Image (spheres, rainbow, N blue to C red):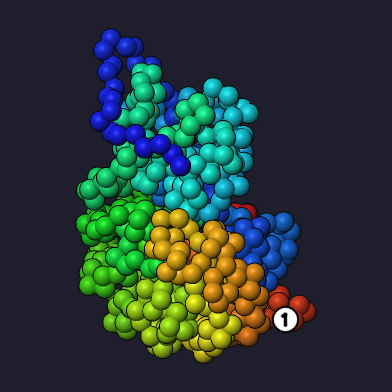
């Protein structure tokens, strides 16, 4: 275990030390959908692998701008730091000759991080390499440092202030053990400082996307927007609450709408994806935000399109109507299970039947829906998996994705192995009613049962991307219907034409 260092143990004493300003490079470039990762998770990937084959690609990987690097770079630039952002998959000719290289991670993707860190170390052995992002919360940081020895520091949780203080310490050659929110190597030991307290919501910056070279013809014209940090819920399998802490920090509605309008006017981008852990909660705030977006866009003659995460228990017809009116194209809904007992055990206190109603409302209003399912949570059985399959088949969302239960650190399950009768970690575990191998078999059975929806991980993402290219909701639904048909009937000429058109539209972004 990492050794804990008290924040007050030491402090930077610059004295007469000459400060040498560092050149900082933040490396991003992670795809929400990658076939190797999905296969590792035991997911059926028929439609996605078919799409990749039709595009002549071995992997389906989009380089999508993520909000964290842009917010971080904006924060640092405002404080006089010389910072650039590079996209690992787009800026292939980029040199890594900066003094400090930060790698921005996602929840999954150790292989991505290792690839980037090794490339940086090979090109620039003198660079200090710093990892940030939620990967350090889903994989123990000491394990990451063993898997990726090129990393010098890991910034835990949100990183603006921690990264700034670390840069300043490196510039004057000061010790870093006074800086909150760090894990790092010293000799043969791994050290951990005390946690960083969450930043107040007013300090969350509106990202300057020009720092990332946006707009760019090499990227889909979609931008992420961060309207809040944190989650008002605390599901047993999820680490969002422990990562962001509570209470949820909401940006002002005026600030969020101002950011949307500015991106339209200055960058010419009209399509957005809200990255909030649960955009639809609380429903009163969500409704107010949607009303303000609609009124502001109507006043300025602007048409926006957007998508987001949502939770069944915070959705109703009135809110969905306001979402649609303000430009909502698609929702990524965590349904998780069709079993009342499993939902209760997960900490998701709503009835499965509520998902049927929300799917019907969304279909009537013209909102694409993706249902996310967790398979294998403690207590799961083959019977509960098939109840989930029946729910999806009846609700008929446009797409769904089944995810193998991930035994992540910093979750309620991880802190109560005996209560949940589970052993193992990550994607390899066993509990009283199921093993991870049996859960993967159950995922295949679920996929075989469902015929009314496309098994398309990232279905809401992809719908948002297609809408940015001018596809209507009906055309997007036609695409999902077509690719589902092609998996079963490869010579369906109508489906081939529909899917082929989409492949040609997005090929340049792969």
User: Looking at the figure, which quarter contains the C terminus?
Assistant: bottom right
Where is residue 2 shown, x and y percent of the image?
44, 39
- Estimate how packed mark 1 is, as few (under 14), some (14 to 19) or many (20 or more) residues with alpha carbons within 10 Å: few
Q: Between 403 and 202, which is closer to the camera in this rendering?
A: 403
Q: How many marks?
A: 1
Residue 146 quadrant: top right
Q: Is residue 12 above or below residue 325?
A: above
Which quarter of the picture shows residue 3?
A: top left
Residue 398, above or below 97? below
* Numbered disc 1: secondary structure: helix
Q: Is residue 178 above or below residue 38?
A: above
**Residue shown at 29% from the left, 45% from the top:** 205
Q: Which residue is mark 1?
A: 488
Q: Position of residue 188 (x, y in %)?
A: 52, 29
420 displayed left or right of 39: left
| Image x and y of residue 278, in percent | 35, 66
User: Relative to residue 472, is residue 194 depicted above or below?
Assistant: above
Q: What residue is rendered at 36% in x and 27% in y?
A: 176
Specify the farthest residue to the front.
418
Residue 327 percent coordinates (x, y): 37, 70
Using the rendered image of the protein, determine whether residue 150 is visible from the camera's viewpoint. yes
Quarter location, residue 285: bottom left
In the image: residue 105, left or right of residue 484:
left
């Amino acid at each position: 275990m990492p050794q804990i260092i008290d924040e007050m143990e030491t402090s930077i004493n610059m004295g007469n030390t000459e400060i040498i300003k560092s050149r900082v490079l933040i490396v991003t470039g992670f795809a929400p959908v990658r076939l190797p990762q999905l296969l590792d998770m035991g997911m059926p990937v028929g439609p996605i692998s078919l799409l990749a084959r039709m595009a002549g690609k071995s992997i389906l990987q989009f380089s999508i701008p993520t909000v964290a690097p842009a917010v971080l770079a904006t924060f640092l630039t405002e404080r006089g730091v010389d910072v650039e952002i590079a996209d690992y998959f787009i800026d292939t000719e980029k040199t890594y000759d900066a003094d400090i290289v930060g790698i921005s991670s996602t929840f999954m993707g150790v292989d991505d991080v290792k690839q980037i860190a090794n490339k940086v170390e090979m090109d620039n052995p003198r660079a200090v390499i710093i990892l940030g992002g939620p990967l350090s919360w889903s994989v123990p940081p000491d394990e990451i440092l063993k898997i990726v020895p090129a990393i010098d520091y890991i910034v835990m949780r949100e990183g603006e202030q921690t990264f700034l203080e670390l840069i300043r310490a490196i510039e004057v050659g000061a010790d870093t053990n006074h800086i909150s929110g760090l894990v790092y190597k010293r000799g043969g030991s791994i050290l951990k400082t005390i946690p960083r307290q969450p930043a107040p919501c007013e300090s969350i910056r509106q990202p300057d996307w020009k720092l990332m070279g946006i707009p760019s013809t090499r990227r889909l014209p979609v931008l992420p927007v961060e309207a809040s940090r944190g989650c008002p819920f605390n599901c047993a399998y999820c680490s969002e609450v422990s990562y962001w802490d509570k209470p949820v920090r909401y940006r002002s509605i005026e600030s969020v709408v101002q950011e949307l309008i500015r991106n339209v006017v200055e960058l010419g981008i009209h399509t957005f994806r809200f990255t909030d852990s649960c955009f639809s909660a609380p429903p009163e705030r969500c409704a107010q935000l949607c009303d303000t977006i609609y009124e502001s866009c109507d006043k300025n003659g602007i048409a926006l399109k957007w998508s987001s995460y949502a939770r069944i228990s915070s959705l109703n017809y009135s809110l969905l109507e306001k979402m649609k009116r303000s430009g909502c194209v698609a929702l990524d809904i965590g349904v998780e299970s069709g079993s009342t007992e499993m939902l209760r055990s997960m900490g998701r206190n709503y009835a499965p039947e509520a998902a049927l109603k929300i799917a019907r409302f969304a279909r009537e209003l013209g909102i694409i829906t993706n249902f996310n399912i967790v398979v294998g949570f403690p207590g799961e059985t083959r019977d509960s998996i098939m109840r989930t399959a029946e729910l999806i088949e009846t609700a008929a969302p446009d797409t769904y994705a089944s995810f193998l239960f991930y035994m992540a650190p910093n979750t309620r399950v991880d802190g109560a192995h005996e209560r949940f009768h589970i052993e193992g970690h990550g994607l390899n575990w066993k509990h009283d009613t199921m093993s991870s191998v049996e859960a993967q078999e159950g995922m295949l059975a679920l996929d075989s049962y469902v015929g009314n929806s496309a098994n398309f991980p990232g279905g809401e993402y992809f719908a948002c991307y297609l809408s940015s290219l001018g596809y209507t909701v009906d055309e997007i639904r036609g695409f999902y219907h077509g690719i589902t048909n092609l998996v079963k009937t490869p010579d369906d000429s109508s489906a081939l034409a529909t899917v082929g058109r989409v492949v040609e539209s997005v090929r340049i972004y792969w």
